[in-house]
Amino acid sequence: MKKELRFFSQLVEKLIQIEETNPVSEPIPTDQVIGKLNLEFEEEGINDEDWEKLIENVALYTPKTASKLFFNQLFGGRQPKSVLGDLLAVILNSSMYTYKVAGPQAGIEKVIIQKVCQLIGYPNTADGTIAPGGSMSNFMGLVMARDAASTDIPNAGVSQKMTLYTSKESHYSIPKNAAFAGVGRDQVRYIKTDSTGKMDIQHLNDVIQEDKEKGFKPFFVNATAGTTVLGAFDDIEAIHKICQQHQIWLHVDGAYCGGVIFSKNYKRLVKGIELSDSFSFNAHKMLGTPLSCSIIVTRNKKSLSKSFSNEAEYLYQTDADDFDLGRTSLQCGRRNDALKFWTLWKSVGNKGLENIINQQFHLADIARQYIESHPDYTLYSFPDSISICFNYKNISADELCTHLYEEATVMVGYGKYGLNEFIRLITINANNTEKEILHFFKVLEEGSKELESKNMLSMVAS
Ligand SMILES: *Cc1c(COP(=O)(O)O)cnc(C)c1O
């Protein structure tokens, strides 16, 4: 495959160069994309030269998620050591289920899990795994909680009305997972949030109490470390008190901002994390690894095996129980998502991961300061969050973001909290500096001028 590798490295060099001068790809309307880029298959294949041209063209039209003008969602940027780890994982093509086929790669995953358990202060009985994304990590947490609530649900199925609790601001995977787990979407109780987006503790307690009085079985509370819109952190200690009182499993969904465990300064945002029953975070969000790398850990490894192990004689053929990671994972054959996090972590150390997290909050401070010192802006978000929510000159957030996307100016999204809709800038690309953040505002201001004059023209025309 020498030829393909040569092509690959030339292509990547070209893409990175273009990304510098042209950080936003021109969007193609959905009804044109298949035809315009020749994505359809034909009976005969194409020659290598045409194949290479086609691949290059497709790559050039793909949204550039690592560029300095990508602020759209909860990931971005590129950690070179991590990218290399992921490329190597593809070449090695290990499957993580057994030590026999994964060898040291299984050791790498184990080291990551152990270190994370230590960092958050879990007991020695703790263990974890890597799931295909944060939604699936939340699913694993929910299933472990369900199976812990009764002795025989994995065999007999759910026979009781089981209720679960999560804030209105939490991720949509919670109701989806409730459906998957046979508990049902209707059993999800959405707890109110306060003005800063945190779960209302009193409301949580009241709703649990009410459900118990009705004869339901409350079994799972999901606390969020970094809500999807505002980036708010639920109060884990206060929620834990209630969970303890009612014997309910506490899961912390840190998909977005659970990475704060790596920072001495920002770890305070998940104070009490050691009291949780399970905790998950996406290294592909705050830690900047390629997608996906989602880690879930739990206090007692028995919870993992109770819910996820199954005998399989054809699979487990050596005496390496602890390193046969398939015994505690969601999948059977499983991609190696550990290596890319390990290559980064090994290279920069604990301190380097800490710097990544601190830089994201530093960039958020810069953005908030800019907004607060410019009267044309309104700020909607709070300190200790890397989601900066704002509006500019009363221009509709939806309209402005769509204009910026269509004109290939900057990739940024919008969100809603209460009655307010706003632009949401995510300062998660730790390779950015103050310069890129200020550049973002400049580009946004120029883009909105264009939009204003376009609207003016269309008013005149009509
Ligand atoms: C991103 C996110 C998820 C989902 O993670 P995926 O890897 O996209 O499945 C879950 N919860 C929160 C709070 C998130 O921000």
Image (spheres, rainbow, N blue to C red):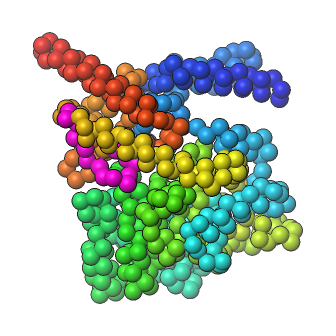
**Residue 19 appears in the rendering:** yes
The residue under the point 21% across, 21% down is 452
Q: Is residue 363 left or right of residue 157?
A: left
Residue 29 lies left or right of residue 131; in this view the side is: left
Residue 310 magenta-highlighted: no
Magenta stretch: includes residue 379: yes
**Percent coordinates x, y for residue 121 in the rendering:** 57, 72
Q: Is residue 23 left or right of residue 2?
A: left
Query: Quadrant location of the N terminus?
Result: top right
Range drawn in magenta: 375-388
State which quarter of the image contains the C terminus: top left
- Secondary structure of the magenta portion, mostly? loop
Tell me residue 347's x, y (percent).
Answer: 70, 47
Q: Say if residue 143 shows up in the picture.
A: no
Q: Which residue appears at 31% of the width and 23% of the height?
A: 447
Which of 426 and 455 lies nearest the eye of the viewer?
A: 426
Residue 35 position (above or below residue 319): above
Q: Is residue 441 left or right of residue 140?
A: left
Residue at image position (77%, 46%) is 93
